[in-house]
Amino acid sequence: MLKDIVEARGAGGHRIWVRFEDGVAGEVDVSTLVKFHGVFAALQDLEEVQKVRVDVELGTVCWPGGADLDPDVLYSVLTGQRIELRDPALVA
């Protein structure tokens, strides 16, 4: 897919709203994508989730504590398109 996120904001609760460079946009519930430990532990706090921002170098969303999400996963959630693996050897 390789589409960059160009805009993001908190949408209340564990939800964020994102817009991709091709115009695809919508809300995603972060709690359905991550387990709240490690770098994602801070996102249990709903106020932390709302601090989402776009990392323009990575083309994805990130938070002050260092958490980020794969833009391909977010695109897949919003569009229903499957993620295509380029190298089958990467699948364990």
Image (cartoon, helix red, strand yellow):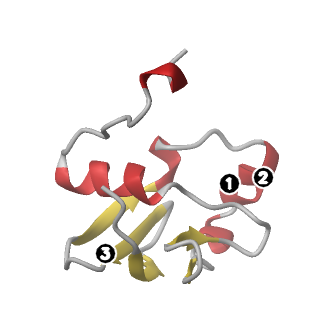
Point out residue 69 in the picture as x, y percentages from the top left corner.
55, 57
Point out residue 71 in the picture as x, y percentages from the top left corner.
44, 60
Q: Is residue 48 left or right of residue 6?
A: right
Q: Which quarter of the image is occupied by the C terminus?
A: top right
Identify which residue, 60 or 30, lies in the foreground. 60
- Please say if 67 is above or below 36: below
Q: Nearer the viewer, mark 1 or mark 3?
A: 3
The mark that comes first in sequence, 3 or 2, is 3
- Please say if 28 is above or below 52: above
Can you identify the residue that label 1 sits on?
44
Return the mark for residue 12.
Answer: none
Q: Amino acid at mark 1?
A: Gln
Q: Amino acid at mark 3?
A: Phe
SS at mark 2 in the image = helix
Point out residue 66 in the picture as x, y percentages from the top left corner.
76, 65
Tag 2 near tag 1, CB within 8 Å: no
Kindly report the distance in space between the C-alpha atoms of the residues bearing marks 1 and 3: 25 Å
Q: Which quarter of the image is occupied by the N terminus?
A: bottom left
The mark that comes first in sequence, 1 or 3, is 3
Can you identify the residue that label 3 sits on?
20
Q: Nearer the viewer, mark 3 or mark 2?
A: 3
Return the mark for residue 39.
Answer: 2
Q: Residues within 10 Å of mark 3 (few under 14, many from 20)?
A: some
